[in-house]
Image (cartoon, coloured by chain):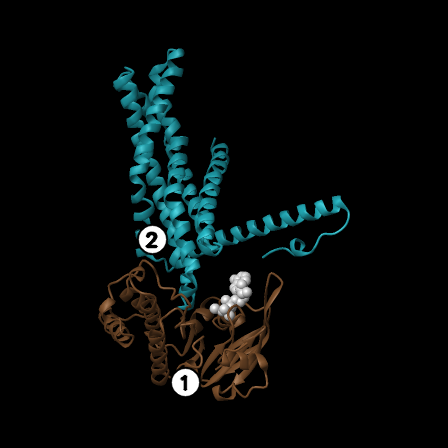
């Protein structure tokens, strides 16, 4: 898949060489981006056309979703607690610490719940997805599937994709709930905000569209994680080194993409 | 029948196959031999349709493998069996489940029928006592025999072996070759085997193809190898440089 410019020997005038090399890099990047795009297209295409391997999807939900519950609860609790601390500090300067509840809840539901839960899932499950598929690639298990007349996308990629999109919104909601509870513990038990105010104001200010927005975000983050991590595993270089490199790249890339995509989704939903 | 017509393939501008033509008749068993790194696996992957040639084509019973896609390709491949160099077993499945996998996914047989067939295949390769072990828990020879059982259980018309006995001790290697020989006599598949077990593999096959420098330098019965006029062919067979 290397563009020809890369392999042809650049000769002559320095600025021309520089331009050639720049062009070659750009072409390579474009080719990679194209390959990722095609991968996404095939992944979505196979997900939408039956047969879907339901048993495999369930097993992946167990791994991606159920397996992430503990880490999501832990990070959720502490995120809510620190939000409460910081929020109280800021709000009490304006004498409006009654709004601590909505501040914590809105921050979590609209933003931090989906994003941090997604980052945790990328680190915990995404890396494992890449390593697993990479090892299957290296061990020729993907070839073996193909040679049995079975489609590796249906068997390996699509179950991860669907499972991530099912698990992520649930995990984000769990994160929100635990976070709000953590914020309550700090705000009410530690800082002395009234419990009724904390919860009551949340009910007043938190709207359905905030919750739905967070859920849409979480679903798309699930798509991003499974897309990037499956892609990196599918096109792993050979050897153990290849797998470890792919795993690192998958986590970094999906985390960056989550944050970038989050900005665009937020600005679109405003 | 498999017809390989003038296949060329380069990786990063380095030619690996430079115009290969071979015909394997129905029911015939051909050994593909040659030194390591000369493209034997690459050629076999073309025959299985895992790689696309830069030019040339592969015909299986007259169908052009290089132009098939989607369901047609899947249908053709259901007639193939492939024993990979490393076995390519699914790590997370036991020996039994590995062998049962193609039956469960490709046929509508009941779980009982599948179990009977899998046990029969495992008995044939001498693995009936290890059916619950995971691939990581068995030896290299057992991995290869499991891979063989997985390929045999579908009773494919075409069977390809990529070094099924490499890395095994001589006795086990001979055992695997004997097993393949017996299967060929019973199932009459059309096959290609890559092997370094010279001259033992010559007892198993009908014809031998020698791959050297990206070309077929000899294609004929095993007993003609020593009389070949080609220096490279004789060196390979006698093991002397
Ligand atoms: N996917 C690939 N990408 C790049 N080079 C490859 C690939 N597969 C094989 N090669 C190269 O092709 C040559 C032949 O490899 P191979 O067919 O595995 O040899 P062998 O005859 O030992 O089976 C080697 O030089 C190898 O590096
Ligand atoms: Mg090889």
**Which residue appears at 40% of the width and 51% of the height?**
A131
Q: On what subunit does the disc labeled 2 rest?
A: A
| Left or right, A144 with reference to B230 | left
Q: Is residue A18 above or below residue A207?
A: below
- Give percent across and percent down for residue B208: 49, 82
Chain A colour as displayed: cyan
Which secondary structure lies at badge 2?
A: helix
- Tint applied to chain B in the drawing: brown
Disc 2 to disc 1, C-alpha distance: 48 Å
Q: How would you rate the neighbour count of disc 2 (Cα within 10 Å): few for under 14, some for 14-19, many for 20 or more?
A: many
Query: Which of the image's four quarters has the C terminus of chain B?
Result: bottom right
The residue carrying mark 1 is B203
Whole-percent x and y of residue B165? Answer: 39, 73
Q: Judging from the image, what secondary structure is the residue with disc 1 in?
A: helix
The chain to which mark 1 is attached is B
Residue at 37% over, 53% down: A159
Residue position for label 2: A57
Residue for point 34% across, 46% down: A64
Above or below, A99 relative to A44 = above
């Amino acid at each position: 898949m290397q563009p020809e410019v890369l392999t042809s020997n650049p000769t002559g005038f320095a600025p021309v060489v520089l331009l050639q090399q720049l062009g070659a890099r750009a072409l390579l990047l474009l080719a990679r981006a194209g390959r990722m795009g095609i991968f996404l297209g095939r992944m979505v295409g196979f997900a939408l056309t039956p047969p879907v391997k339901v048993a495999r999807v369930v097993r992946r939900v167990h791994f991606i979703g159920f397996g992430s519950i503990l880490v999501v609860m832990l990070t959720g609790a502490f995120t809510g607690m620190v939000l409460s601390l910081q929020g109280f500090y800021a709000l009490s300067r304006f004498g409006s610490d009654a709004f601590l509840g909505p501040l914590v809840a809105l921050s979590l539901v609209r933003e931090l719940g989906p994003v941090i839960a997604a980052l945790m899932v990328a680190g915990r499950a995404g890396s494992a997805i890449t390593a697993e598929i990479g090892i299957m690639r290296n061990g020729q298990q993907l070839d073996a599937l193909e040679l049995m007349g079975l489609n590796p996308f249906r068997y390996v990629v699509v179950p991860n994709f669907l499972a991530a999109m099912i698990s992520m919104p649930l995990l984000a909601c769990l994160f929100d709930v635990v976070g709000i509870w953590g914020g309550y513990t700090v705000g009410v038990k530690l800082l002395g905000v009234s419990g009724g105010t904390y919860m009551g104001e949340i009910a007043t200010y938190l709207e359905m569209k905030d919750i739905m927005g967070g859920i849409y975000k979480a679903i798309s983050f699930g798509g991003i994680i499974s897309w990037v991590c499956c892609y990196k595993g599918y096109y792993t270089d050979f050897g153990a080194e290849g797998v470890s490199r792919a795993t690192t790249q998958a986590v970094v890339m999906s985390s960056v993409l989550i944050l970038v995509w989050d900005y665009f989704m937020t600005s679109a939903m405003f | 029948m498999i017809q390989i017509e003038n296949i060329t393939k380069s990786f990063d501008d380095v030619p690996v196959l430079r115009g290969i033509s071979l015909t394997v008749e129905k029911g015939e068993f051909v050994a593909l031999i040659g030194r390591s790194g000369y493209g034997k696996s690459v050629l076999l992957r073309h025959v299985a349709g895992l790689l696309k040639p830069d030019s040339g084509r592969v015909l299986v019973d007259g169908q052009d493998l290089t132009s098939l896609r989607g369901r047609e390709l899947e249908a053709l491949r259901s007639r193939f069996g492939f024993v990979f160099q490393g076995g390519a077993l699914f790590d997370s499945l036991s020996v039994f489940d590995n062998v049962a996998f193609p039956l469960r996914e490709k046929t509508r047989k009941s779980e009982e029928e599948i179990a009977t067939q899998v046990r029969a295949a495992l008995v044939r390769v001498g693995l009936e006592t290890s059916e619950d072990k995971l691939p990581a828990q068995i030896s290299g020879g057992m991995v290869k025999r499991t891979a063989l059982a997985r390929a045999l259980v579908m009773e494919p018309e075409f069977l390809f072996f990529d070094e099924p006995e490499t890395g095994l001790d001589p006795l086990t290697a001979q055992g695997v070759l004997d097993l393949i020989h017996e299967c060929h006599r019973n199932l009459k598949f059309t096959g290609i085997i890559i092997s370094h077990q010279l001259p033992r593999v010559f007892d198993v096959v009908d014809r031998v193809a020698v791959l050297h420098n990206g070309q077929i330098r000899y294609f004929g019965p095993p007993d003609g190898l020593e009389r070949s006029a080609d220096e490279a062919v004789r060196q390979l067979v006698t093991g002397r440089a």
